[in-house]
Image (cartoon, rainbow, N blue to C red):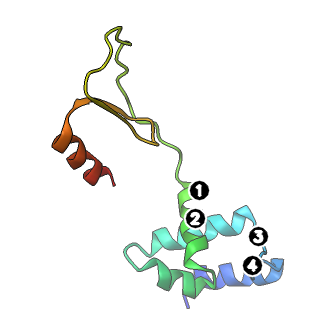
Amino acid sequence: MDARVKRFRDEASRQGAGGVGRRYPEELRSMAVAVVKARGDEPLARVAADLGVSSVSLQRWIEQEQPARFRPVEVAPESEVEPTGLVLITPQGYRVEGLEGEALVSLLRVLG
């Protein structure tokens, strides 16, 4: 067994972490994410099994470790002209104007 995995399991056992409904302390979650990074391309499910945690929890811990990123956007000035044709506003806040029929259907298929 990998030394990092053994250390994680020992610490989790010592702290009483794990099991359904129990929370792992931040230190243990960071330790688990470090094991994932050290193993590179190994399947997440295998690493999770070795650590004794669910792959869903492990995936969530990885996502929480990553800092939020902003994407640059270009904001167009509001037009006083009423849009012609259909207007698509996605749940993510994107607004698409000026597409007709098949072009709009194609876009919806790509986004769907």
Image position of 23 with respect to 13: above or below: above
Mark toward the start of the polypeptide (1 vs 4): 4
- Give coordinates of residue 29: x percent, y percent: 65, 67
Find residue 60 and name its label: 2
Give the residue number, with chain letter if any, for mark 4. Answer: 11
Mark toward the start of the polypeptide (4 vs 2): 4
- Give coordinates of residue 81: x percent, y percent: 31, 10
How many marks overall? 4
Q: Could you tell me which quadrant the C terminus lies in?
A: bottom left
Distance of mark 4 from mark 2, alpha carbons? 20 Å
Q: Tell me if mark 1 has few (under 14), some (14-19) or many (20+) residues whose alpha carbon lies within 10 angstroms of its own.
A: few
Q: Tell me if mark 4 has few (under 14), some (14-19) or many (20+) residues whose alpha carbon lies within 10 angstroms of its own.
A: some
Give the residue number, with chain letter if any, for mark 1. Answer: 64
Tell me what residue is drawn at x 53 percent, y 68 percent: 59
Mark toward the start of the polypeptide (2 vs 3): 3
* Apparent side of residue 58 relative to residue 107 in the rendered image (left or right): right
Tags 1 and 3 touching, CB below 8 Å: no
Distance of mark 3 from mark 4, alpha carbons? 13 Å
* Apparent side of residue 56 relative to residue 73 in the rendered image (left or right): right
Query: Which structural element holds mark 4?
Result: helix
Find residue 23 and name its label: 3
Mark 1: amino acid:
Gln
